[in-house]
Image (cartoon, rainbow, N blue to C red):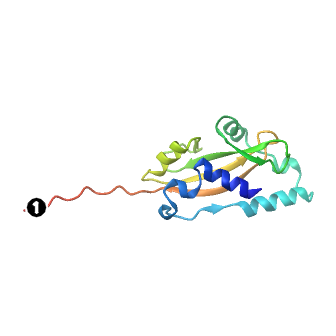
Amino acid sequence: MCGDLLSNLAVMGFGASSLRGAAGLRGAVVDHRFARRHLINEFRRGRLRKDQVCDAHPELIRAATNFGAPTQVRCPICDEREVVLVTYVFGPRLPAFGRVVSTAAQMQTLSRSSDDLAAYVVEACTGCRWHHLLRVLPIGGRKKRAAPQQAQG
């Protein structure tokens, strides 16, 4: 199931290698699959109630409905709909609540920023309101090059 989700990320262009190339990343990609798996297992064992795991903020559901990238991954909680991916970018000169990125072109533009930014990829089910942070990707941080000095002579 997670493998399908990862392949969808690569196809969409929101994977780490699509931003600046794997060698160009300035920090580590933080993957939250183990935490996701643990939460799902706790729910299936009856240790967590549905209202404890299906509590997405209305703004996340709105972003998922209007800007989310579809996947072929069924919701692990309700198994009625496919989850969608919502990518938020946070950093200097961006709104405090982040910027929703809905296209690969928008992500490419932000990745060329000289500011250090972070992209948060969240999966969400618009049916039952399940959501989970999948990964955090460092983007941007490109330093502007100084203009070449003219040789004096």
Q: Nearer the viewer, residue 138 or 92?
A: 138
Secondary structure category for the residue under label 1:
loop
Question: Front-most of 30 and 53?
Answer: 30
User: In the image shown, does 97 or 129 lie closer to the viewer?
Assistant: 129
Q: Residue at x 61, y 53 (%)?
A: 10
Is 101 displayed left or right of 34 in the figure? Answer: left
Percent coordinates x, y for residue 24 in the rendering: 47, 62
Asked if residue 117 shows in the view, the reply is: no
Residue 40, compared with residue 100, is above or below; it is below
Q: Is residue 115 visible?
A: yes
Give, as a three-letter code, the residue at label 1: Gln
> Which image quadrant: the N terminus?
bottom right
What quarter of the picture does the C terminus occupy?
A: bottom left
Q: Position of residue 56 (x, y in %)?
A: 75, 44
Q: 10 Å neighbourhood of mark 1: few (<14), some, or many (≥20)?
A: few
On the image, the x and y values in percent for residue 60 come to 69, 41
Looking at the image, the residue that sits furthest to the right is 46
Q: According to the image, label 1 marks what residue? A: 152
